[in-house]
Amino acid sequence: MIKTLCIGEILWDTFPDKKVWGGAPANFIFHTAEFGADATAFSAIGQDDLGTELLSVVAETGINLVAERLKYPTGKVDICVNSEGVANYQFNEDCAWDHLPLTSELMTLSQEADLIAFGTLAQRNEISKKTIHKALELKKDSCKVLFDINLRADFYNKEIIEKSLNYTDILKLNEEEIVILQDLLGLSIQQIIDTYKLELVISTLGSEGSCIMTNSHSFEYPAVKCKVIDTVGAGDSFTASFIINYLQGMDIPEAQKLASKVAAYVCEHKGATVSIPSELKPIAEKGLQV
C-alpha cells in the first residue's frame, strides 16, 4: 500500500453557518486515503477545546493524524464563499501549526513515506519551516515530493518558494498562482520545470479545467460541468486523485480525466472532505500496491 504523508497546517474551516476540519495538506491527504493510500497527516494543535474536537472528528476519517498538542491555539480560518462559489480565507496567526516540532515520529514517517506533500502556508513561521525542510531531507530516494504552493495572503516569499522547489518532484498550483509564481521568479512554467528538474506541474484552472505539464508535453482537459456549491477542497481532491492513479501507472490523460470528475463531485458538495463514490476511484477499489 502506498504511504502518503503531509506536513503542515490542520485547522478548522469556519463558514458562516458551520465549521469543518481542513487545511490544504490535510484535505489532500484525506483524499489520498479515499483513493486507497495509507495516509498520515503531521501537524500540531492547541491544548484547547477546538484541538480536542478536531482530534475526535479526524479520528472518524481514514487518515492517521499525528498532532502534537502545544500551548498555542488550534488553527482556524474564516471562509466566506461568494455567489460564484469561490472562497476567501482569513487565517488566525501564531497558532499551533506555526510551531511544528521535529519529533522522532515525524522523522520515521518521512523515511517511510512514498509521497510527501507540503505547502508554503506552514512555512510562514521559521520553526515549522525548518521542521518541514528537515523532514524532506530525510526521505528515501524513491519517495516523491508534492509541493502544493497554496499562496495565501502575505504568507510566502521568493526564498521560501525557491527553497521548496529544490525539494520538489511535482508542483501543484492554480490559475492565480501561475501568474504570481512566474512574475516572482521571472521564469515561465516550462523554465521552472527545467530549472528545478520537476517531473510534473499540475495546474488547476477553475472553470477552464486543468493543465498538466512535463518537460516535453502539455495535457489539457476541460472542467467537468457541475452545479457548484463551493470550491473548497476541489483542487486538493483533483490532485490526490491524479497523483494516486498516476503513481499506480495510469497514463496522464486518463488520470487527469478521472481527477476532473472527482473535483466536479467535490464542488457539488459543501466543505473539502467529501467522501468520493466508488465509481470515481477504480484503482482504490482494486487495492493499491507500491
Image (tube, grey):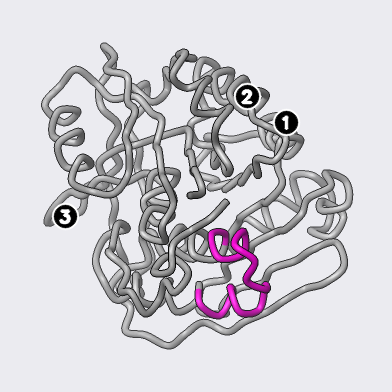
Kind of element beneath mark 2: helix
**Circle 1 residues within 10 Å: few <14, some 14–19, many ≥20:** few
**Circle 2 residues within 10 Å: few <14, some 14–19, many ≥20:** some
User: Quick check: 143 above or below 108?
Assistant: below
User: Quick check: 279 above or below 141?
Assistant: below
Which residue position holds label 2? 133
Amino acid type of disc 3?
Answer: Pro
Residue at the spot x=24%, y=66% of the render? 270
Q: Which residues are magenta?
A: 243-258
Badge number at residue 194: none
User: Quick check: 248 above or below 20?
Assistant: below
- Camera-nearest label, 1 or 3: 1
Q: Where does the image place residue 61, in percent across and percent down from the top left?
A: 24, 49
Residue at the spot x=66%, y=51% of the render? 171
State left or right for residue 141 relative to residue 14.
Answer: right
Amino acid type of disc 1?
Answer: Lys
Which residue position holds label 1? 163
Residue at the spot x=83%, y=58% of the render? 188
Residues marked 2 and 1 touching at CB (< 8 Å): yes
First along the sequence among labels 2 and 1: 2
How far apart in space, not on screen, are marks 3 and 2 (Cα)? Answer: 35 Å
Residues marked 1 and 3 touching at CB (< 8 Å): no
Q: Where does the image place residue 8, in percent across and percent down from the top left?
A: 45, 33
Which residue position holds label 3? 16
Q: Where does the image place residue 23, in percent across and percent down from the top left?
A: 37, 44
First along the sequence among labels 1 and 3: 3
In magenta segment, residue 38 = no
